[in-house]
Image: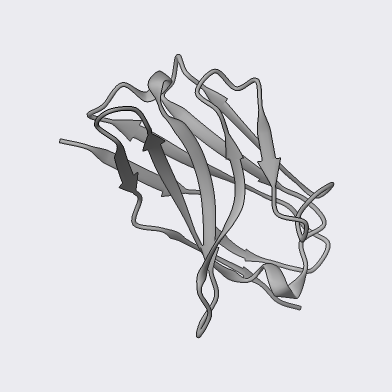
């Protein structure tokens, strides 16, 4: 059974930091590209950051470059999102996603974790 379980969300003041984790099980984690998305109320779900299967390549939305860092630990089947210098506009539900291309593509989503930035 495939599971992606996010944790680490919460309420933080502007300028603060949070570290999100996404623990994976039920599939070969090290074969999948992992990504973090976010969705604010009334808005579409947008890509925040992605990391390839071996962790050697990352990409970020322009809005979070220099503030967020995605990383992964394939030994622990976990992907992380370190979020620093948080802004009010970072408030959203954050989701992790696993993707595998090839002949039989696969994609899995977590249930999401709420991040609220407020003073």
The structure residue drawn at horizontal position 36% and vertical position 45%, both measured from the top left corner, is 5
Picture quadrant where residue 54 is located? top right
Q: Quadrant of the N terminus?
A: top left
Question: What color scheme is it?
Answer: one colour
- Residue 69 lies, in percent from the top left, at 71, 40
Q: Is residue 84 above or below residue 57?
A: below
User: Which residue in the rendered view is the most extreme toward the bottom?
Assistant: 42
Q: Is residue 12 above or below residue 53?
A: below
Q: Nearer the viewer, residue 53 or 81?
A: 53
- Residue 85 lies, in percent from the top left, at 82, 57
Total numbered circles:
0
48 horizontally vs 25: left or right: right
Q: Nearer the viewer, residue 3 or 30?
A: 30
The structure residue drawn at horizontal position 45% and vertical position 14%, both measured from the top left corner, is 75
User: Which residue in the rendered view is the most extreme toward the top?
Assistant: 75
Q: Nearer the viewer, residue 68 or 57?
A: 57
Q: Is residue 58 above or below residue 114?
A: above
Q: Nearer the viewer, residue 17 or 95?
A: 95
């Amino acid at each position: 059974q495939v599971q992606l379980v996010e944790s680490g969300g919460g309420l933080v003041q502007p300028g603060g930091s949070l570290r999100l984790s996404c623990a994976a099980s039920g599939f070969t984690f090290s074969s999948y590209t992992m990504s973090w998305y976010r969705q604010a109320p009334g808005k579409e779900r947008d890509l925040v950051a992605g990391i390839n299967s071996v962790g050697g390549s990352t990409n970020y939305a322009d809005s979070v470059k220099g503030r967020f860092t995605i990383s992964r630990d394939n030994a622990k089947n976990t992907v992380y999102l370190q979020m620093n210098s948080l802004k009010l506009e970072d408030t959203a539900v954050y989701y992790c996603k696993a993707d595998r291309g090839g002949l039989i593509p696969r994609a899995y989503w977590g249930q999401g974790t709420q991040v609220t930035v407020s003073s």
